[in-house]
Image: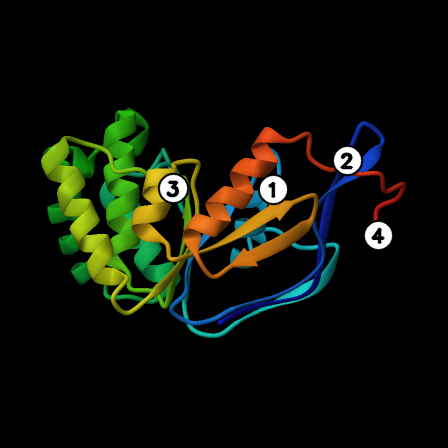
Amino acid sequence: MITLENLTKAYWYRGKPKYIARDLNVVIPDGARLALLGRNGAGKSTLLKLIAGSINPQRGRIRVTGSLSWPIGLSGCIQGELTGVQNVKFLARVYGVDTDMLLSFVEEFAELGLNFNEPVKTYSAGMRGRLSFGMSMGIRFDTYLIDEVSSAGDASFRGKSNRVFEERLKDSGLVMVSHSDGLVRSMCTTGAVLENGSISFYDDIEEALEAHNRNLQGDGVKNTSDELLG
């Protein structure tokens, strides 16, 4: 379960604070398959980083029960100077999982061949995507944080990726950021719309998408706050 208590985060923009979260009080239950929606710049990726602990709020706190992934995307959690193998070994140490098991899984899943032993900075974007997604699927989490992830590779590889992810979600939840309505519909059952530091929840993903699309079509609400809360 993920609990946000009086969470506040803002950045200065043109002399005024732009709120990503403003006194948010949110509970995301175990097993939820939640789409986090919002217009460009609303702060969806920043909110995921707050939940993951990558950045700190100005005020409030986040409590997490169970294991939580990093925000998974095509380029996340990879060091370019290290080889694919070294990246996997490092991740295994950080998360306390069996190194040999994770190496075996990623090597087979990512289909990198001899490139697995080469520096990641020499990889194509697709190869980096396969490595990143393979590492994330090789570790089982209670909740996955997904930031604009898409499967790299041909149709066969994308099919394999979808099957593995669906298998993980039988026992796990997710919070997903995506601009693809189709992907959101296929992966999520509920939704939340982030707008000017506030968040609205919907038990039905179609209702969430409708609310999000209404925001995109309208002018939105201007942030008129004068000062950033410390």
Residue linked to disc 2: 222
Residue 45 appears in the figure: no
Q: Amino acid at mark 1?
A: Gly
> What residue lies at 36% left-to-right and 68% top-to-bottom?
142
Residue at mark 2 to residue at mark 4: CA–CA distance: 18 Å
| Number of other residues with Cα within 10 Å of mark 4, as a class: few under 14, some 14 to 19, many 20 or more | few
**Mark 3 or mark 2, earlier in chain:** 3
**Residue wearing tag 3:** 73
Nearer to us of marks 1 and 4 is: 1
* Residue that label 4 marks: 229
Q: Is residue 152 left or right of residue 224?
A: left
Q: Secondary structure at mark 3?
A: loop
Q: Are marks 4 and 3 in contact (CB under 8 Å)?
A: no
N-terminal label among 1 and 4: 1
Please state which of the two labelled residues, at mark 2 or mark 4, is closer to the viewer: 2
Looking at the rendered image, the disc whose residue lies closer to the viewer, 1 or 2, is 2
Estimate how packed mark 1 is, as few (under 14), some (14 to 19) or many (20 or more) residues with alpha carbons within 10 Å: many
User: Is 194 left, or right, of 112 in this rendering?
Assistant: right
Identify which amino acid the numbered label 2 is placed on: Lys
Kindly identify which numbered label has been placed on residue 43.
1
Task: Give the residue displayed 16% in from the left and 33% down from the top.
Answer: 115
**Label 3 to label 2, Cα distance in Å?**
30 Å
Specify the quadrant of the image occupied by residue 120: top left
Q: Earlier in the sequence, mark 2 or mark 4?
A: 2
Pick whichever, 126 or 99, lies toward us.
126
